[in-house]
Amino acid sequence: MKPKSLDEVLALLRQPEMQSWWAEVLKRRAELEAAQKQQAELLSEASLTEFRSELSQKTAIDTLYRAGELDDAAASMLFEATDLENRSYRAVSDFEEQRFKVSELWYRLGAAEKMLEERREGHAQSSSKKSESELSAAERTHRTSRDDYERETERRNRLWDEVERIWAKSAEVNLLVAEHRLRAKRVRREAEALFAEAEDGKRRSADLRAKADAASSRCQAAETALRSSLDRAREQLGCAVGNDFLYFLRKDSSRMALCVSLIEDHENYNLELSALGVYLVDRQRGVAFLEPLAPSAASPEQGDRRFEEYFLRGRKGAAASPLKLEG
C-alpha cells in the first residue's frame, strides 16, 4: 500500500474505472442482500413448516391412541354385553322356575279356600267340637297357603324386574358398542389425515431446505463476487480494502491515514457517514474514531464551507464534513 496525498485519492475516485467499480460493488451488494433475504425467508418458512409437521404428527399419534382407546372401550363393552346376555338367560330361567312355583301355590291356595268354605258351611250347619277343630285347621292351611303364595309372588316379581333391568342394560351397552366402534373408525380416519398432512409438511420442508441450500450457495457466490470486486480496488487503487472502507496511507503524515467510506451510516460511528465520503483516521485507532478533513486539506472551492458546516451543524443533518466525490 503506497502512501498517497488527498489530491491523488480524489483523482483516483474520479476515474471512470472507479465509477464502474463502484457501480459493480453496489450491484454485488444488492445481489448479496437479496440472496440473504431469500435464504432467511426460506429457512424461516422451512422451520415453521417443520414445526407444523411435527405438531401434526404428534397430534396424529395422540389421535390414533384415542382411536385405540375407543376400540378398547368397545371391546370391554362387548364383553359386558355378552356377560349381560348370559345373565339374562339365567335370570329368565330363574323367573320361569319361580313362575311355575307360584302357579302351583296358586292352585294350592284355591284348594285351601274351597276347603275353608266347606268347613265354614259344615260348622254353620252342625256346630260341634270336631267341626270347629276342622274349621281351625282349614283356616291355618289357608293362611299358610296365602302367605306362601304372596311371598313367592313377590319373589317372582323381583326376578322379573331383574330380567327387565338386565335386558335394558344389555340394550344400552350394545348401542354404545356400535357408537364407540363408529367413533373409533372416524377418529382413525382423522389420524390418517393428520399423518398424511405431517408427511406432506416433511416433503415441503425438505423442498424448502433444498431451496434454502441453493440460496445459501447463491449467498456464498454473491459474497465471493463482492469480495472479488472489493479486492480489485486493491490492485486498481493501491489501497487496503475492508468490507466498509478503503484505506490509503497519507503522504504527509506517518500517523494519519485517509479512508473512503463504502457505506452510508448515521448511527454507528462518531460521524455520520456518506458513501464515497473521504475521512481522516489515526493509523492505530482506525475507524473507531473518524475525523473530518481540515479546511487546508480540502479543495479551495469546498474546504472552508464544509469545515464551517461541520462545526456549526455537528452530527445533526447531513454527514459531517467528509470529502465526497461529486457527480
Image (cartoon, rainbow, N blue to C red):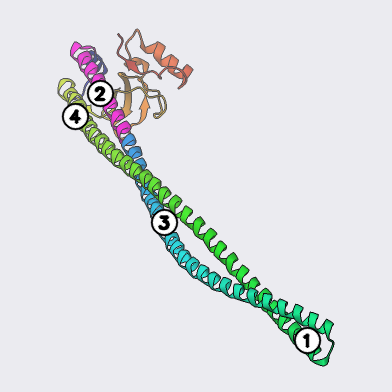
Please, is residue 265 above or below residue 56 in the view?
above
Which residue is pictured at 45% across the width and 67% down the height? 86
Mark pair 3, 4: CA separation? 55 Å
Looking at the rendered structure, the secondary structure element under dot 2 is: helix
Residue linked to disc 3: 69
For mark 3, does the 10 Å Cα neighbourhood hold few (<14), some (14 to 19), or many (20 or more) residues? some
User: Which secondary structure is most common in the magenta stretch?
Assistant: helix
User: In this image, 158 relative to 188: left or right?
Assistant: right
The tag earlier along the polypeptide, 1 or 2, is 2
Residue 262 occupies quadrant: top left
Magenta-colored span: 14-43
Badge nearest the viewer, 1 or 2: 1
Quadrant for the C terminus, please: top left
Task: Answer whether labels 1 and 4 touch (C-beta < 8 Å).
Answer: no
Foreground residue, 52 or 139?
139
Foreground residue, 40 or 121?
121
Residue linked to disc 4: 221
Task: Please state the horizontal and vertical placement of residue 155, each as a whole percent of the image.
Answer: 62, 73
Residue linked to disc 1: 136
For mark 2, does the 10 Å Cα neighbourhood hold few (<14), some (14 to 19), or many (20 or more) residues? some
Mark pair 3, 1: CA separation? 70 Å
- Does the segment drawn in magenta span residue 27? yes
Q: Amino acid at mark 2?
A: Glu
Mark pair 1, 2: CA separation? 125 Å
Foreground residue, 50 or 183?
183
- Does the segment drawn in magenta span residue 90? no
Task: Please state the horizontal and vertical placement of residue 23, each as a whole percent of the image.
Answer: 24, 16
Please, is residue 140 above or below residue 42 in the view?
below
Residue linked to disc 2: 31
Looking at the rendered structure, the number of numbered marks drawn on it comes to 4
Which residue is pictured at 72% across the width and 80% down the height? 115
